[in-house]
Amino acid sequence: MIGSRRWRLADELSVDQASQALEPLLVRGPALLGDTTSRIPLAEIEAQPVASWLAVVRVTAPRFMPNPYDDTRLRAHFSLRNQSYNLSVSDRSPWVEVARRQHGAAPSSDWYLTVSLTEPYSVTSACHKLVAAAIEIPS
């Protein structure tokens, strides 16, 4: 939580406006947040800080599958320049519940995914990559 006041929606962007804002920021891959793994060991981050903790990618036909460790969440399976990724989804937007009930239905459209690094996870001593937000791009 940031502050004690509730957030309120200030404005919305059309898909075209969002595309114009996001396209120049895209990470082209195949590396994502410094490498092609799903997590970065904390020792590596301490030795050489990552350049960014957020990345925006554009992917085609990602698959959103139920997370085997937590059936209330999803995992995003996608490819970025022939590098496969399988990352947890933390987005809580309404589309997540729909996708969770569809058990891995693969949309054929393109999507913008915001990928972020978690705080260090004590069990693995690593910062894990996850999909923090996803926007479907209508065809």
Image (cartoon, grey):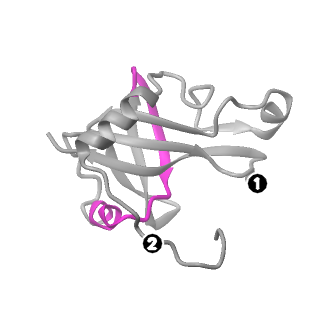
Residue 103 spot, x, y in % from top left: 28, 59
Direction from residue 115 to residue 61 in the image, left or right: left
Q: Nearer the viewer, mark 2 or mark 1?
A: 2
Position above or below: 34 against 109: above
Callout 1: helix, strand or loop? Answer: loop
**What's under tag 1, amino acid-wise?**
Val
Position above or below: 69 against 77: below
Position above or below: 26 against 108: above
Residue 55 in sight: yes
Marks 2 and 1, how far apart at CA = 36 Å
Determine which residue is flagged by label 1: 123
Tell me what residue is drawn at x 79 percent, y 31 percent: 44
Q: Where on the picture, by quarter, is residue 58?
A: top left
State the quadrant of the C terminus. Answer: top left
Residue 14 within the segment the image draws in magenta = no
Q: Where on the picture, by quarter, is residue 46?
A: top right
Callout 2: helix, strand or loop? Answer: loop
Residue 91 within the segment the image draws in magenta = yes
Q: Where on the picture, by quarter, is residue 72?
A: bottom left
**What's under tag 2, amino acid-wise?**
Arg
Direction from residue 32 to residue 51 in the image, left or right: right
Query: Range of the magenta residues?
Result: 80-100
Position above or below: 6 against 96: below
Residue 126 spot, x, y in % from top left: 73, 44
Q: Earlier in the sequence, mark 2 or mark 1?
A: 2
Determine which residue is flagged by label 2: 8
